[in-house]
Amino acid sequence: MKGFYHRKPEHPGAFLERCYLKPLRLSQSEFAKMLGVSRRRVNEIVNGQRSITADTAIRLAKCLKTTPMFWLEKQQLWELYEASHDKK
């Protein structure tokens, strides 16, 4: 299964920043308030240091008019890529 994913998918946090935060001109602090979470949580997601959990996916879906599965699928693709390219 190693190498199954040839192109590295974009981390969902990077996608969030590129496709939503920047175009909407929202700071991480403003967006955190909209979601009802800490700025640190948003920052860690955007920087790829934190996963999109079910709770976060629900919050993102409500706020951005998407679905929770949209975000969870992005997270899952990222995790599958990382697991299939693990150097252990």
Image (cartoon, rainbow, N blue to C red):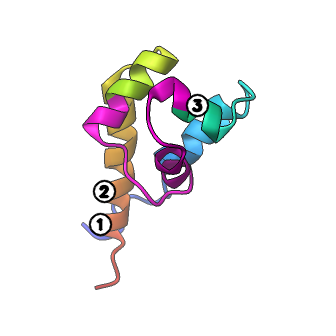
As helix, strand or loop, the secondary structure at mark 3 comes to: helix
- Expressed as whole percent of the image width and height from the top left, the position of residue 18 reads 66, 39
Mark 3 lies on residue? 31
Q: Which mark is residue 83?
A: 1
Task: Tell me, yes or no, whether the two marked residues, 1 and 2, touch with CB atoms within 8 Å.
Answer: yes
Residue in view at x 24 percent, y 66 percent: 1
Where the C terminus falls, by quadrant?
Answer: bottom left
Q: Furthest residue to the bottom?
A: 88
The numbered mark, 1 or 3, whose residue comes first in the sequence reads 3
The amino acid at mark 3 is Phe
Nearest to the observer: residue 75 or residue 50: 50
Q: Secondary structure at mark 2?
A: helix
Name which residue type carries label 1: Ala
Q: Evaluate whether residue 9 shows in this view.
A: yes
Nearest to N terminus: mark 3 or mark 2: 3
Q: Tell me if residue 19 can be seen.
A: no
Rendered location of residue 6, percent (x, y): 45, 60
Is 33 displayed left or right of 17 in the figure?
A: left
Q: Which residue is mark 2?
A: 80
Front disc: 1 or 3: 3
Residue numbers of the magenta segment: 33-57
Residue 17 pos. (x, y %) = 62, 40
At x 29%, y 66%, the residue is 83
Tell me which secondary structure the magenta stretch mostly adopts: helix
| Residue positioned 41% across, 21% down in the render | 61
Q: Secondary structure at mark 1?
A: helix
Of the residues tagged 3 and 2, which is closer to the observer?
A: 3
